[in-house]
């Protein structure tokens, strides 16, 4: 296994926060700890679900807890509910990242600093901590910024886009290594880096042991009035990246089918807008975020899951929910860019149907074809589960990071 590593991790979210990046970061850290490594985590107070600090964490500016493998220090995240208020969000991110940097930079020498983005300023936080701790910086890119923001129309000012792109390139140049989730993302970043050899593809793990196929008629269905229905579900963040209008279009097209219900399970900055747009559609249900330990039950409650991404985003992001859906043995309809990682997974696994982004007719046809063919749904679900059982486990992903960290110890001067 090699000698024990001393790791500083600066990540935007960490359990019990329900953000997908927090779930990923938490499991990687736990697995690294299980391998015997020492980790000091610097992160935010939980705030993701309501875009406000969770009630049980309020009244604290900094909180520190000890774990068997090290410590978790949480700081105030300066949350902004309105994602369209770019100046306010930027100021909040900057304040949060500066506070993280001040804390992460204090302490004894580390073997490596691990930072996760978005937000992109976390790269600068990691760089500062790496300088202070005399360690190489490894940056994990979950979503490519500013690409996602530009595609969504959040960033439109050419000067702001140029500044964000300059920060992106500056960030990559300060890293000993940059890890991405897919070959799509590697190609994206390689065009922006002087030394693409520092890029490494380490996919997010799949918890095939934690998420197992279950019966659809479960307590989740009973609690939310879904018993006896055929359920089409979107589960995840309800934000600007998702084309949930496609789901509402499908609900409208199938409104005369009493047996079908469309569920949006989650929360986010645009939830209120979608709730307003769904008024009058009696076959649409909104369910709030569920605790992480209930994820398997939520996934099992659907007959069909959807991953609807806006055009251009599938090459800059790989939603981790894709793998969880397949682990739960449920078929997937993905509205994503052709040739993207999600489209490839759907095709190679045989567990999903990929349609062009923002194409209501194709999306509805795919949904209808699965609703009318229960046997096909079952076959696709089994194929997805078989695909996932061959994928990287949390322990394997943690070991891949540990191997990378050990290699970089020899090149710490590159930061």
Image (cartoon, rainbow, N blue to C red):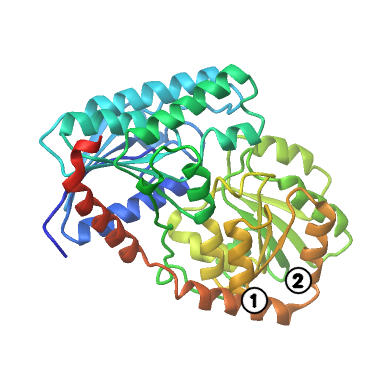
The residue drawn where x is 25% and y is 33% is: 63
Q: Residue 221: percent from the left, percent from the top?
A: 62, 64
Q: Which residue is outermost to the right?
A: 256
Q: Which mark is residue 370?
A: 2
Q: Are marks 2 and 1 in contact (CB under 8 Å)?
A: yes
Q: Which residue is outermost to the front?
A: 194
Looking at the image, is mark 2 or mark 1 earlier in the sequence? Answer: 2
Q: Is residue 375 above or below residue 336?
A: below
The residue drawn where x is 56% and y is 65% is: 325
Q: Residue 382: percent from the left, percent from the top?
A: 58, 79
Pointer 1: residues within 10 angstroms few (<14), some, or many (20+)?
A: many
* In-front residue for pair 225/199: 199
The residue drawn where x is 20% and y is 44% is: 411
Q: Which mark is residue 7?
A: none
* In-front residue for pair 14/361: 361
The total of numbered circles placed on residues is 2
Secondary structure under tag 1 reads helix
Q: Residue 248: percent from the left, percent from the top?
A: 78, 49
> Which residue in the structure is indicated by mark 1?
380
Q: Residue 51: percent from the left, percent from the top?
A: 50, 33
**Residues at marks 2 and 1, CA–CA distance in whole angstroms:** 10 Å
Dividing the picture into quarters, in which one does residue 57 lie?
top left
Residue 236 seen in the current view: yes
């Amino acid at each position: 296994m090699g000698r024990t590593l001393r790791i500083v991790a600066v990540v935007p979210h960490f359990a019990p926060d329900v953000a997908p990046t927090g779930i990923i970061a938490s499991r990687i850290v736990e697995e690294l700890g299980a391998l015997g490594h020492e980790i000091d985590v610097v992160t935010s107070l939980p705030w993701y679900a309501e875009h406000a600090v969770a009630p049980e964490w309020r009244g604290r500016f900094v909180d520190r807890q000890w774990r068997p493998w090290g410590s978790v220090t949480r700081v105030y995240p300066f949350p902004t509910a309105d994602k369209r208020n770019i100046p306010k969000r930027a100021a909040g991110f900057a304040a949060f990242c500066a506070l993280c940097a001040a804390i992460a930079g204090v302490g004894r020498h580390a073997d490596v600093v691990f930072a996760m983005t978005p937000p992109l300023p976390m790269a600068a936080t990691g760089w500062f901590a790496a300088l202070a701790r005399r360690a190489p910086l490894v940056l994990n890119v979950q979503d490519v910024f500013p690409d996602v923001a530009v595609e969504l129309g959040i960033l439109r000012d050419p000067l702001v886009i140029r500044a964000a792109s300059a920060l992106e390139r500056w960030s990559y140049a300060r890293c000993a290594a940059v890890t991405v989730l897919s070959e799509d993302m590697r190609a994206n970043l390689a065009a922006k880096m002087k030394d693409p050899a520092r890029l490494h593809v380490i996919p997010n793990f799949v918890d095939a042991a934690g998420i197992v196929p279950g019966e659809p008629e479960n307590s989740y269905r009973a609690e939310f009035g879904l018993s006896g229905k055929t359920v089409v579900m979107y589960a995840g963040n309800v934000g600007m990246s998702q084309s949930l209008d496609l789901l509402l279009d499908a609900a409208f097209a199938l409104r005369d089918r009493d047996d079908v219900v469309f569920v949006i399970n989650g929360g986010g900055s645009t939830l209120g807008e979608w709730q307003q747009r769904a008024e009058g559609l009696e076959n649409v249900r909104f369910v709030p975020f569920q605790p992480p330990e209930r994820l398997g039950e939520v996934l099992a409650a659907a007959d069909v899951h959807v991953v609807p991404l806006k055009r251009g985003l599938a090459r800059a992001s790989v939603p981790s929910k894709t793998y969880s859906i397949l682990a739960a043995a449920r078929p997937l309809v993905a509205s994503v860019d052709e040739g993207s990682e999600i489209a490839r997974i759907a095709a190679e696994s045989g567990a999903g149907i990929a349609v062009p982004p923002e194409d209501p007719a194709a999306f509805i046809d795919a949904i209808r074809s699965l609703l009318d063919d229960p046997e096909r749904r079952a076959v696709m679900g089994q194929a997805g589960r078989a695909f996932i059982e061959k994928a990287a486990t949390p322990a394997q992903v943690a070991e891949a990071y540990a191997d990378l960290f050990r290699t970089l110890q020899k090149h710490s001067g590159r930061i």
